[in-house]
């Protein structure tokens, strides 16, 4: 039996896949299986994964799907065949530190945790440097990744926790549901996972703003309905309010029309009211984003003006970075 099963869904990532799988081949935890799911990728990914399966037959195996099913279903398919005591997820363009899964598995054993998380950082590769930035994961609404976590396999099975199919932002409901359904949660206070910021990613770029909002609405509506079905609204109203407030304020940064922005705020208000989150909070969280959301939610004028202010500040910051870019690039990674 393996200590950890690491699931890697793969689609059109041949440029980065070898680096990702190399980081998993170097893991210091001995009893690890890496399940590489080739999601009908039309490039050379299957061959790259096959080379690792030949070189490390005791650690790597691949599943080749004839039809593209998306990252959620690819992960769900791999979970069905996973044999590890714990399950972890790595994206095919990212990489893990060599001791990531050893440290997290040891923490899981010593704390009997169902979910273990670690800190993570993003990175961008430039012509002559790599720039790193720590990703905040202190608050619930910040730590929505699955790639910086380990999940006890029998726990996921017993709680019937899977990834939503045909939904972008699939990590967030999975991570929330897994943490809300247990009190056995632990953390390794080290940066162990490296998240690549790709300009061609699904959720990045100005043109994706409007569609991202629609996708978020689908995800959030399904997630809140799932929480209600599980009977988890009452005990986690404060965290869910924080989650929705964060999504509302994040929309201020999207390059969308005022009509779309106001529509999204209205949708968030609908969820807050439908599930009576404010009434169900024993104490309304003293959180900056919650207070800002509650302050502006009732005024269309204030919401639009706030979005203009946010974008003006964003432009100013980008302009400043542009002026300073030569000196920044010479300093290398930060």
Image: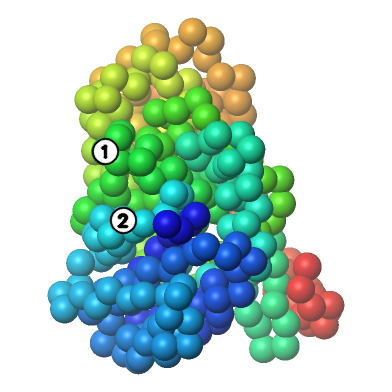
Quadrant location of the N terminus in the rendered image: bottom left
* Numbered disc 2: secondary structure: helix
Q: Which mark is residue 179?
A: none
Question: Could you say which disc has been placed on residue 79 in the image?
Answer: 2
Residue 74 found in image quarter: bottom left
Identified at 28% across, 82% down, the residue is: 41
Residue 88: image x %, image y %? 46, 55
Above or below residue 290? Residue 247 is below
Return the residue nearer the eye: 302 or 285: 285
Mark 1: give few (<14), some (14-19) or many (20+) Cα within 10 Å: few
Residue 79 visible in the picture: yes
Q: Is residue 275 above or below residue 173?
A: above
150 or 238, which lies in front? 150
Q: Which residue shows up at 53% across the image and 10% down it? A: 283
Residue that lies at the very extreme toward the front in this rendered image: 1
Front residue of this view, candidates 13 and 60: 60
Image position of 95 with respect to 280: above or below: below
| Quarter location, residue 189 | top right
From the image, tell me which residue sits under label 1: 160
Quadrant containing the C terminus is bottom right
User: Could you tell which of marks 1 and 2 lies nearer the N-terminus?
Assistant: 2
Task: Give the residue drawn at x 40%, y 50%.
Answer: 171
Residue 7, position in %: x, y? 40, 63
Looking at the picture, tell me which residue is in the foreground, 297 or 34. Answer: 34
- Spatial CA distance of label 1 from label 2 is 12 Å
Residue situated furthest left in the rendering: 67
Give coordinates of residue 69: x percent, y percent: 20, 67
At horizontal 41% and vertical 16% (from top left) the residue drawn is: 235
């Amino acid at each position: 039996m393996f200590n950890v099963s690491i699931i890697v869904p793969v689609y059109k990532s041949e440029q980065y896949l070898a680096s990702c799988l190399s980081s998993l081949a170097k893991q210091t935890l001995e009893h690890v299986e890496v399940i590489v799911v080739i999601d009908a990728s039309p490039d050379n990914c299957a061959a790259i994964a096959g080379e690792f399966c030949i070189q490390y037959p005791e650690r790597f195996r691949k599943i080749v799907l004839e039809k593209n099913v998306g990252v959620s279903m690819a992960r769900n398919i791999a979970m069905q065949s996973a044999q590890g005591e714990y399950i972890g997820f790595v994206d095919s363009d990212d990489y893990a530190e060599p001791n990531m899964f050893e440290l997290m598995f040891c923490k899981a054993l010593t704390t009997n945790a169902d979910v273990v998380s670690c800190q993570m950082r993003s990175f961008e590769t430039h012509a002559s440097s790599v720039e790193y930035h720590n990703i905040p994961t202190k608050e619930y609404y910040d730590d929505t990744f699955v790639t910086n976590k380990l999940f006890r396999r029998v726990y996921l099975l017993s709680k019937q926790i899977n990834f939503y199919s045909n939904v972008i932002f699939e990590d967030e409901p999975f991570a929330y549901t897994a943490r809300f359904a247990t009190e056995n949660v632990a953390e390794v206070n080290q940066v162990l996972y490296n998240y690549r910021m790709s300009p061609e990613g699904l959720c990045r770029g100005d043109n994706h703003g409007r569609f991202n909002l629609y996708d978020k609405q689908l995800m959030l509506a399904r997630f809140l309905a799932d929480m209600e079905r599980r009977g988890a609204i009452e005990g986690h109203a404060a965290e869910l309010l924080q989650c929705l407030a964060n999504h509302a304020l994040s929309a201020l940064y999207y390059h969308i029309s005022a009509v779309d922005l106001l529509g999204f705020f209205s949708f968030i208000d609908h969820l807050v009211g439908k599930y009576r989150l404010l009434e169900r909070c024993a104490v309304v969280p003293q959180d900056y984003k919650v207070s800002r959301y509650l302050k502006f939610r009732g005024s269309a004028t204030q919401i639009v003006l706030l979005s203009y202010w946010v974008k003006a500040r964003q432009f100013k910051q980008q302009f400043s970075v542009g002026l300073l870019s030569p000196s920044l690039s010479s300093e290398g990674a930060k």
